[in-house]
Amino acid sequence: MSNASVVHAHPLPVPEGKVMLTVEGDVSRTNGDGVARFDRAMLQALPQGTIVTHTPWTEGASRFEGPLLGAIYDAVGAHGDSLRVVALNDFAADVPLPEAKEYGVILAMQRDGEPMPVREYGPLFVLYPFDDHPELQTEEVRFRSVWQVARIVVE
């Protein structure tokens, strides 16, 4: 049995802190009511990514850090190939899983070493490495860069 199979055989731990993210849909690992809930510590325990980039919404280049979207997908034992990312205000966009993995897309939790408050695109922000990949600087990809993320639906 592979390590991935062992990991996916067990339910996720229950969050001890405030829930920051809920993942639902085509998932096999949950921690209650058929969904996976993550607090800050649980998200920080996942494989992390760092992206230093300019964005259309912020001044200058910033250093963004947070779990890889692909790592969240793996942690919940997901089976779909698209992640419907939903913001606090119910705005939603679909992020194709192959694209998220190829470009190391993160769910940014920190900007320049500080947690991101809601008024500054937080607490979670889908972030692409725009500066490293000019082909990502399109309207379509900008639309997928959801901020104030509250949940992900695996489809």
Image: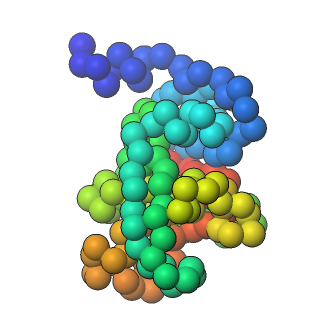
Question: By what rule are the colours in the image chosen?
Answer: rainbow
Is residue 82 visible in the rendered image? The answer is no
Marks counted in the figure total 0
Say above or below: 29 vs 56. above
Q: Is residue 68 left or right of residue 2?
A: right
Say above or below: 8 vs 97. above
Q: Could you tell me which residue is drawn at 45 percent across and 37 percent down?
A: 46
Q: Residue furthest top?
A: 1
Between 8 and 51, the one lying in front of the other is 51
Q: Is residue 61 left or right of residue 134?
A: right
Say above or below: 19 vs 102. above
Q: Residue 86 at what x, y percent from top left?
A: 63, 60
Q: Quadrant of residue 115?
A: bottom right
Q: Could you tell me which residue is drawn at 39 percent across and 51 percent down?
A: 49
Say above or below: 130 vs 83. below
Q: Is residue 59 left or right of residue 19?
A: left
Quarter of the image where the N terminus is located: top left
Q: Residue 61 at what x, y percent from top left?
A: 45, 77
Q: Is residue 150 left or right of residue 98?
A: right
Is residue 100 visible in the rendered image? The answer is yes
Q: Residue 10 at what x, y percent from top left?
A: 48, 16
Q: Could you tell me which residue is drawn at 58 percent across and 43 percent down?
A: 23
Q: Residue furthest front?
A: 113
Q: Quadrant of residue 114?
A: bottom right
Q: Residue 25 at what x, y percent from top left?
A: 55, 43
